Amino acid sequence: CGYIHDGALAGSTPPIMNNIIRYRLSINSLVWAAICWCCILDDTAHEKSMKNPHFLNYTIDSQLKRGDKSRTQQEVVRNYMYDRYSVFFRHLEVHPEMTTNNIYASHFLTLSLYKLWKKTQSANTPDALKAKLITVNECQAYENVFYEIFEDIRDNYEQLKQTYQPNA
């Protein structure tokens, strides 16, 4: 993810999503939204999430280990996940390339999910979507699937937008 703080993204080697910030914000928004949703629907998801120290590194160290008695462990973890999603999404919404090109973040992400869903329904589902994401190569191949989806939407956004705004 490359998250530093308040939506800032660190560089990486190899570069994540060719270091196109709006794509990195997009994939982070999608991932954290799904995780957040799981935490809302599953009362034990926060416990499962805490087993991965990288996943919840900052909040767990600063709030749970400190002994924040005003909130339960579940509330802290849920809040952390929502904060991560909302920070990435907020930065995506106001990213200069999104605003300059009149690309609406929620529409962009919805189209991304739709195109991802279509890929998973195909007889030729990319192997990257079936991987366990343990190796760097598996992660890069997974990112490349999203990269291609994001590029396709970017290249065809005006036409895709018209599908939903025929009388606008």
Image: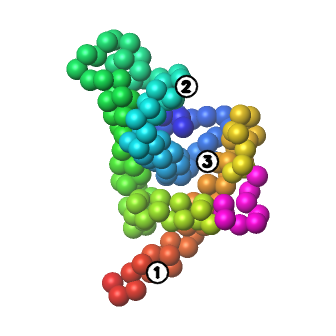
Of callouts 1 and 3, which one flags the residue occurring earlier in the amino acid sequence?
3
Distance from the alpha carbon under mark 1 to that under mark 3:
27 Å
Q: Which residue is mark 2?
A: 52
Name the secondary structure under disc 1: helix
The front one of 103 and 74 is: 74
Q: Residue at x 61, y 54 (%)?
A: 146
Considering only vertical position in the picture, is 72 above or below 12?
Answer: above
Q: Residue at x 33, y 34 (%)?
A: 79
Q: Residue at x 43, y 65 (%)?
A: 107
Q: Which residue is mark 3?
A: 17
Task: Give the magenta range.
Answer: 119-127
Q: Which mark is nearer the camera, 1 or 3?
A: 1
Considering only vertical position in the picture, is 6 above or below 73?
Answer: below
Name the secondary structure under disc 3: helix
Considering only vertical position in the picture, is 61 above or below 138?
Answer: above
Question: Where the N terminus falls, by quadrant?
Answer: top right
Q: Which residue is mark 1?
A: 163
